[in-house]
Amino acid sequence: MSIFKKLFTSSTRTNIDLWIERTFNEINRANSTKTDPKVIIFALINGLNSSLKLFGDSYKTDNAIFELGSYILFRGDYWLFENHPEEQTTLQTALNGEFVKAFSASFPKINCTETYFNRLDCYASLCQYGVESMHFHLHELLNKKDAFPKSYDPSWNIYGRLPLIEQGIKGIEIWAWESAILSTYLEHLDKYFNRD
């Protein structure tokens, strides 16, 4: 490898960066459509990976993408329940499987499926307390410096609110991020139902 390539190649490539590269090539070779669940998850994870710039370099981790992706998939599942209940289970099962598969190499020491469903259960239990409560716990999970996601219990602060000083900064960041990423993700889901 030349000295210039070493100088200008980022050394902060994560397992998810490698998954994105590998999956992009697989999707192109297979001529997959935009409505294939694997393509939907690829677009979500790639978008999440790109959106981490909003939160700063310290959040460019597989763990952060896992947490953000779990949250967006929960919100998407709720949208499916409201808009396409007849196909919700089938599509969400496929999306869940693809998402967990994407992170299995990143977190070989944990049961990704169990941890992912723990997140979905957390957000489901927080729904009744509003989006701010879900954002608080998402913020908490993003700020954990664990090497991999661990089981999480939100009951310690179900009415979770960010401290006032952070509400202004982190609250706006999360709302801005969510409005951009969630609307794009929901557009992908909508295309799935308008694929004819």
Image: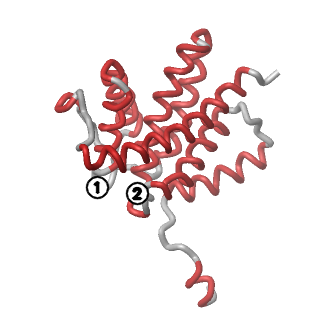
Residue extending farthest to the bottom is 3
Residue type for callout 1: Lys
Residue 192: give x, y in percent of width and height. Answer: 70, 26
Local secondary structure at mark 1: loop
Residue 93: give x, y in percent of width and height. Answer: 54, 24
Q: Which residue is drawn at 71% across and 49% down?
A: 26
Image-based side of 123 in relation to 194, left or right? left
Label 1, label 2: how many angstroms apart (C-alpha)?
Answer: 10 Å
Sequence-wise, the earlier of marks 1 and 2 is: 2
Question: Who is closer to the viewer here, 173 or 10?
Answer: 173
Asked which colour scheme the image uses, the reply is secondary structure
In the image, is residue 2 above or below residue 160? below
The quadrant where residue 3 appears: bottom right
Question: Who is closer to the viewer here, 129 or 43?
Answer: 129
Say which mark, if any, is on residue 59.
Answer: 2
Q: Which image quadrant: the N terminus? A: bottom right
Residue type for callout 2: Tyr
Local secondary structure at mark 2: helix
Q: Which residue is drawn at 30% across and 51% down?
A: 143
Residue extending farthest to the top is 86
Residue 131: give x, y in percent of width and height. Answer: 38, 28
Q: Residue at x 41, y 50 (%)?
A: 64
Q: Do the residues labelled 1 and 2 touch (CB within 8 Å)?
A: no
State which mark lies toward you, 1 or 2: 2
The quadrant where residue 117 appears: top left
Say which mark, if any, is on residue 45.
Answer: none
- For label 2, the crowd category at 10 Å Cα-Cα, with few meaning under 14, some 14 to 19 and many 20 or more, is some
Q: Name the residue under label 1.
A: 145
- For label 1, the crowd category at 10 Å Cα-Cα, with few meaning under 14, some 14 to 19 and many 20 or more, is few
